[in-house]
Amino acid sequence: MSKNAFTLRYLTRAAAGVPRDLASSVVSRLTPIKPTVLIYNCTWVCDARCEMCNNWKHGDRKSDMTLAQLEPAMSHPFWGHIENLNISGGEPTTRNDLPEMVELFERHLPRMRKIGINTTGLTPRRAIPMLTRIVTFCAEHDLLLSVRVSLDGIGDIHNQVRQVERGFDKASETIHAMQALAEEHPNFQFGIASTIFASNLEDAQNILAWARARKLDIVFNMLRFTDAMLNNKDLEATVGFHEREEQFMRSFFLDRVQEESVFSGQAFMYLHYADMISNGYKRTMPCPFRSQGLLLNPYGDLHYCENSKAIGNVLTTPAGQLYFGADNLAHREEIKHDVCPTCLSPCQVNVGAMKQFVPYAKFLLRAYQVKHDPSRHLETLPTPQP
Ligand SMILES: C[S@@+](CC[C@H](N)C(=O)[O-])C[C@H]1O[C@@H](n2cnc3c(N)ncnc32)[C@H](O)[C@@H]1O
Ligand code: SF4
Ligand code: SF4
């Protein structure tokens, strides 16, 4: 399906939820509200060994929660407000029960409207049938599904970054099959995701051109370091950005703002990343995890977000008890004070954007200005989030 049609469908559903979102946003200032966004890293097991992520070093299938363990943890009205679910890892398709996992979530998350899955696409023979089954299931249950295959270079550069032989050819096979599937299913959006850093910076334009030639939607991730999500804080010293990468990425992101529709989630994110590179990494984007998100990791550890400590384990304590626990909520306040102001996480940022009407309207205005004249970007910089 075309990106525009999918976006329209998504926006229509988001618009239907606006009155509830506005009410929740007011209520969340007075009292904690239930989560609406959930990231589930379903395993750290991985079929790649990327230079910028350490998840593959932590794979331990025996410790992963089984579906028999996940089901009771999810069987509670506490989860009833989740609207957006992202399944990531590690490599989700290394779990043979991934389709059943999606079905389990559908049973227990009555308000869920969109599922996102990130995959390497490196094992096409396993991934293609699995993802096809998930696409069909979501179509039958009126769920929007977005899948992205990661691609960090064209040809050998991808193989080097991912440290996988013939990785580019394998990922291409999955990309090709998923793109064909998306043509047939209006509920399914497919695209690729690229993480640019020193190793593949010179290939960023090639990746863009390759995606464009194939009419593939592409999102560029900003490099970041987080232990709860990527186990990679210790890589910052070796892989982190220097001035060359910062200069390149700032102008690369501004170029993307020029091309993207201001209504696309990507333009929102890219403009804010350009802001952060320019303003000394002060965050100006909203984030739904500040007030209504959770991150569940493979062994059952629960975090408020990718920068929170584990607030407990769902195998031993109901998630609602952990989420609303006074000590844990105090920890969330500390994160908001200490970490949010410079956090680079893009996780579900578009959800956060649409739930905050006034900041979103301000963004639209700025995006128009920058599109018209990127050299005036610095004049448009907003004040950082409180
Ligand atoms: C952690 S992976 C998990 C899913 C799957 N294994 C994959 O690679 O697509 C999810 C996304 O995070 C991106 N990523 C990896 N390391 C990153 C980093 N240091 N900063 C930002 N994004 C990163 C990956 O490229 C991928 O698109
Ligand atoms: S980015 Fe994805 S594929 Fe690469 S090591 Fe991390 S989890 Fe594995
Ligand atoms: S630390 Fe980052 S991910 Fe966590 S709530 Fe703040 S902005 Fe969101």
Image: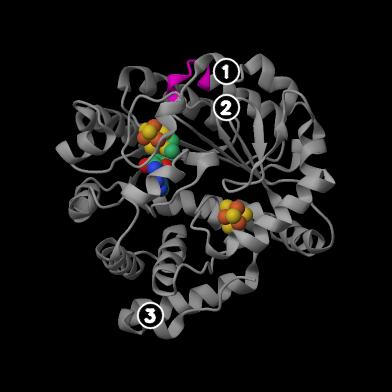
Determine if the magenta segment contains residue 204.
Answer: no
Q: Secondary structure at mark 3?
A: helix
Tag 3 residue: 377
For the point 48% across and 19% down, which residue is it? 95
Mark 2 near mark 1, Cβ–Cβ under 8 Å? Answer: yes
User: How crowded is the residue under tag 1: few (<14 C-alpha within 10 Å), some, or many (20+)?
Assistant: few
Span shown in magenta: 93-98
Q: Give the Cα separation between the discs numbered 3 and 2.
A: 41 Å
Which percent across, then down, holds residue 268?
A: 46, 64
Tag 1 residue: 63
Which percent across, then down, holds residue 199?
A: 23, 47
Q: Secondary structure at mark 2?
A: loop
Q: Secondary structure at mark 1?
A: helix
User: How crowded is the residue under tag 2: few (<14 C-alpha within 10 Å), some, or many (20+)?
Assistant: many
Which numbered circle lies on residue 298? 2
Looking at the image, in which quadrant does ligand 2 appear? top left
User: Foreground: 160 or 258?
Assistant: 160
